[in-house]
């Protein structure tokens, strides 16, 4: 394997006025050696990583980095700037600039080697030696580990720029550091056996019981900031007399902390910009939760804050930004966005129960007829040779699975809000909603109430002796009691009446009112192709079906499924009749879209919408609206909540149902062909692909 950094990858007189120019100059050296195959594409990946979070660090360091498909092997390039380049560090421009390029499929060993550079940058002697290096060979040897910092510092330094200020929070350099290019030492990648246990001697021999902290660090790329924050925290812990053990969760994988170390810890520090993996291990501990750069720049402050929280007995086990459905959220997002994620959490966990239970019910009807719901329990009567007994078995299993819909919906809404402590009151509240016939609306309210109650309880300061039992005993007990009281005696009855009124309204729909509802449902099902609007319409139909199989609810279910089948079927038809308007990849996707659409998987149209949203989505919505309106006009009904074309025998007026779907597919396919044909293009699929690149980027950004 060639060396990661050579003389050709070092520029001690980097002339760049911006971080973009600096990255291009260093990347051009990589491209000249064949280590970057597409310079502009690689720089786009670097810029995308930089957009997530500035890569400037205190002490005059810039460390742009990324993983890219345009990199052939792990590579480092180093530039030293006299004027300095602004990489967003709080203390000003950087004079030491490292560009780290990792292949998209780099193995663990390569990524671990890259991470060791990040740890070296926390060593003041290493930084000073780079500033003093008199030639490119000396700098490259220092970075590779072929020369000690003292030897490099002794080299002529006539061209070295003035030293940039060092971080005020940085600790003294570690006693030893392993060179870049070698496997990290035990201090850099601790194994379970090497992690200090609760019974080991404290770092400070004069203190019988040292303050113990466990920490987790992680950054979006998992190459640089992850390990720099880990090193900074470890050095600060040594300086402050704290027994601090870090788990860096980098791209090369991570070694989990010994559970005994976590159990003995007095506090936890999370310095991360991506979700902490297996976060529940740290429940019941005072927690400081910050971005990864805070771990690099102010580790002593974080340690002091952890001490203060432990002294106050703060229980900070599940900050809002760490809940399961908020992991992709942006800082400062509003309650509307959070509410949508909480609700989508419940829906996403509910859908598998819908699919399994609904299809079993559909099979029961298909085999035994619509009177199968009157069959006795299979525990009382089951004839092995009688097909109606098998139909009853399928129907009753499906009915039990379907009965979990509302409790699961409520439980996982609460889970999305408050993590695992929200599950118990959420399921309890959802079960009460079923008991009092509050239906789908009751499940929604129960989930939100459960999550809110748990979040409120978590804010209460409790004695240290109670912290360990809070998540498993106290919170479930108190929250279930409060949610049960509210659902049974306060909000349950009004919601049940509203649910009953909604069911009666749907049952009475006919004529123009039903057609308007069908249009609205069709537009929602096709607007975002499986996204929030689609799921709201689908959940509305499922809620009605689970509450009462009235004629109105069955019509809604039929309209929702028919409209959801339209987009993928329309794209499949369009690629068949006018293939030259689509790329080769889209034509291949069109073949799969036939099956996906027939199976009621609306997401089958997403590849087409991502490539050309301004044409595909409006066309799909038009087709969905036509289909929704026609199913209502044809009085189509559906007892199965899923299954697509495979449950047509269970549909009321099945031939007209197929006509409604075909009409919507024809409208959507015709519109998308018309809109694509109006666009100026060279007349080839290749030209089309280039023409839709901007739309694809806008779809991804959206």
Image: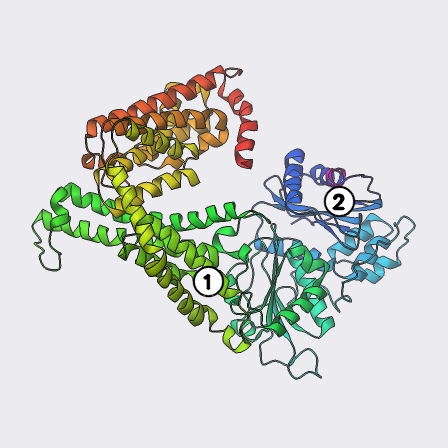
* Point 66% across, 84% down: residue: 208
Q: Is residue 139 above or below residue 262?
A: above
Task: Give the mark, 2 or 1, whose residue is nearer the N terminus.
Answer: 2
Q: Nearer the viewer, residue 459 or 147?
A: 459
Reply above or below: 604 against 148.
above
Q: Secondary structure at mark 1?
A: helix
Dominant secondary structure of the residues highlighted in magenta in the image: helix
Quarter of the image for residue 143 reads bottom right
Q: Is residue 46 left or right of residue 516?
A: right
Up/down of 330 relative to 210, above or below: above
Residue 136, image x and y in percent? 82, 48
- The residue indicated by pointer 2 is 9
Q: Left or right of 50: which side holds 452?
A: left
Residue underneath mark 1: 454
Which stretch appears magenta?
19-24
At a point 24% along the width and 38% down the height, the residue shown is 507
Q: Please state the horizontal and vertical placement of residue 98, each as a whole percent of the image.
A: 74, 48
Crowding at dot 1, Cα within 10 Å, few <14 / some 14-19 / many 20+, comes out as: many
User: In the rendered view, does 345 fall on the left or right side of 641?
Assistant: right
Q: Is residue 21 magenta?
A: yes
Most extreme residue toward the right is 158
Q: Give the quarter of the image for residue 180.
A: bottom right
Q: Nearer the viewer, residue 28 or 431?
A: 431
Q: Tell whether position 288 is magenta.
A: no
Position of 601 relative to 492 (above/below): above
Q: Which mark is residue 650?
A: none
Alpha carbons under labels 2 and 1: distance apart: 55 Å
């Amino acid at each position: 394997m060639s060396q990661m950094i050579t003389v050709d990858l070092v520029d001690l007189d980097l002339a760049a006025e911006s971080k973009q120019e600096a990255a291009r100059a260093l990347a051009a050296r990589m491209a000249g050696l064949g280590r970057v195959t597409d310079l502009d594409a690689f720089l786009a990946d670097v810029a995308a990583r930089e957009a997530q979070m500035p890569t400037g660090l205190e002490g005059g360091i810039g460390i742009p980095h990324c993983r890219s498909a345009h990199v052939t092997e792990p590579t480092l390039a180093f530039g030293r700037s006299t004027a300095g380049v602004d990489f967003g560090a709080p203390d000003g421009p950087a004079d030491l600039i490292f560009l780290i390029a990792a292949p998209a499929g780099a193995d663990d060993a390569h990524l671990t080697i890259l991470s060791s550079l990040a740890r070296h940058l926390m060593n003041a002697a290493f930084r000073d030696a780079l500033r003093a290096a008199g030639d490119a060979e000396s700098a490259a040897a220092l970075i590779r580990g072929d020369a000690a910092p003292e030897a490099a510092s002794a080299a002529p330094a006539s061209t070295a720029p003035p030293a940039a200020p060092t971080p005020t929070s940085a600790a003294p350099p570690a006693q030893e550091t392993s060179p870049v290019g070698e496997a990290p030492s035990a201090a850099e990648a601790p194994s379970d056996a090497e992690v200090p246990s609760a019974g080991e001697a404290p770092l400070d021999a004069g203190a019988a019981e040292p303050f113990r902290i466990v920490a987790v660090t992680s950054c979006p790329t998992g190459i640089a900031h992850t390990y720099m924050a880990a090193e900074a925290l470890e050095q600060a812990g040594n300086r402050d007399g704290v027994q601090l053990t870090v788990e860096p969760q980098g791209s090369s994988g991570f070694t989990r902390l010994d559970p005994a170390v976590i159990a003995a810890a007095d506090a936890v520090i999370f310095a991360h910009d991506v979700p902490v993996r297996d976060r529940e291990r740290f429940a019941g501990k005072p927690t400081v939760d910050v971005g990864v750069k805070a771990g690099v720049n102010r580790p002593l402050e974080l340690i002091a804050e952890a001490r203060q929280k432990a002294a106050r007995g703060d229980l900070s086990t599940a900050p809002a930004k760490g809940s399961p459905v908020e992991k992709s959220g942006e800082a400062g997002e509003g309650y509307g966005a959070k509410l949508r994620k909480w609700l989508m959490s419940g829906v996403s966990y509910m859908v598998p129960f819908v699919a399994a239970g609904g299809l079993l019910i559909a099979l029961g009807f298909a085999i035994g007829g619509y009177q199968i719901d009157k069959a006795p329990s299979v525990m009382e009567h089951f004839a092995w040779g009688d097909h109606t007994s098998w139909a009853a078995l399928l129907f009753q299993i499906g009915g039990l699975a379907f009965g979990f819909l509302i409790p699961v919906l409520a439980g996982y809404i609460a889970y999305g809000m408050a993590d695992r402590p929200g599950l118990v009151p959420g399921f309890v509240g959802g079960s009460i909603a079923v008991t009092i016939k509050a239906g789908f609306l009751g499940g929604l309210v129960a989930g939100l109430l459960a999550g809110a109650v748990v979040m409120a309880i978590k804010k209460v300061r409790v004695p240290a002796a109670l912290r360990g039992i809070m998540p498993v005993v106290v919170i479930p007990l108190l929250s279930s009691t409060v949610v049960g009281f509210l659902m049974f005696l306060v909000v349950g009855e009004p919601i049940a009446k509203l649910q009953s009124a909604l069911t009666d309204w749907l049952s009475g729909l006919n004529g123009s009112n039903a057609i308007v509802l069908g249009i609205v449902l069709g537009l929602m099902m096709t607007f975002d192709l499986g996204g929030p609007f689609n799921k709201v319409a689908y959940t509305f139909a499922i809620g009605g079906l689970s509450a009462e199989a009235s004629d109105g609810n069955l019509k809604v279910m039929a309209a929702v499924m028919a409209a959801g089948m339209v987009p993928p079927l329309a794209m499949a038809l369009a690629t068949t009749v006018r293939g030259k308007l689509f790329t080769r990849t889209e034509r291949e996707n069109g073949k799969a879209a036939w099956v996906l659409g027939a199976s009621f998987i609306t997401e089958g149209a997403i590849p087409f919408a991502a490539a050309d949203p301004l044409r595909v989505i409006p066309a799909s919505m038009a087709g969905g609206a036509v289909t929704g309106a026609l199913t209502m006009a044809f009085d189509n009904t559906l007892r199965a909540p899923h299954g697509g074309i495979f449950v047509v025998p269970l549909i009321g007026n099945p031939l007209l149902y197929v006509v409604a779907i075909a009409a919507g597919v024809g409208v959507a396919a015709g519109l998308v062909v018309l809109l694509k044909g109006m666009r100026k293009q060279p007349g080839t699929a290749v030209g089309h692909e280039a023409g839709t690149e901007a739309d694809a980027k806008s779809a991804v950004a959206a």
